[in-house]
Amino acid sequence: MHVDGDDIDWNESDTGEAETMFRRKQLSPAADGKEIGCSLYELPPGKRSWPYHYHEGNEEAIYVLSGTGTIRLVDGAYGLSAGDYVALPAGEAGGHRVINDGDDDVPLRYLAISTMRDPDVVIYPDMDKVGVYTGTPPGRHEGRKLTKYYPEDANVGYWPDESDPD
C-alpha cells in the first residue's frame, strides 16, 4: 500500500529524561506493513533516542537521511551522517543508541527498519532492565497483551515453593 509520509502524524516522545526526546512517524503501520517495520525518526540537537538496548528477537537497521550525530554500538561509538547505514543484528551484538551531538544545529533524521517478530525481549544494559513484549510486534501497541519490565537480575523459581533456582 502506498502512503504519503506528509500525511502521517509525528508522535513526539519526551520521556522526562532531559536528554531523551525525539519525533517519530510510524511508516510501516500506515502502509499496512506486517513483517517489516519502518519509522522515520527526527532527533533534535543535543538529544538521544531510546536508551541503549538490544532486541533478542528482532533485527534492526538504521539509514541516515540528514544531519549528523553518533551511534553507540557494543564495540564503541561511530559518527553518523547522511547516507550511513548501520545493521543491528538480534542479540547483544546489535546493542545501540542514537545521539544527535552533531556540530550543526539541525535535527538528525533517519529511518529505523526492523523485523516484526512477536514476542520480543529487549535488554537495557545501562538500566539493568529487561523488557518483555507479547501480542504485537515491536513498535506496535494496539493489541499488545503484555508489556513488562523487570530488573535484569530478577530471578524466581518455577515452582511456588522454589524461592531461588540457582
Image: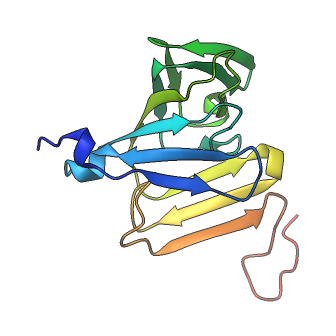
Q: How did the renderer colour the structure?
A: rainbow
74 vs 137: above or below: above
> Which one is in front, 162 or 63?
63
120 vs 40: above or below: below
Q: Quadrant of residue 121?
A: bottom right
Residue sitting at x 41%, y 68%: 135
> Which one is in front, 64 or 127?
64
Q: Is residue 3 left or right of residue 5?
A: left
Q: Quadrant of the C terminus?
A: bottom right
74 vs 132: above or below: above
Residue at the limit of the structure toward the left, as seen here: 1
Residue at the limit of the structure toward the front, as seen here: 105
93 vs 158: above or below: above
Q: Position of residue 49 (x, y in %)?
A: 63, 40
Q: Quadrant of the N terminus?
A: top left
Residue sitting at x 70%, y 45%: 51
- The mark total stands at 0
Residue sitting at x 67%, y 58%: 15
Q: Position of residue 31 (x, y in %)?
A: 20, 47
> Which one is in front, 18 or 137?
18
Q: Is residue 26 left or right of residue 90?
A: left
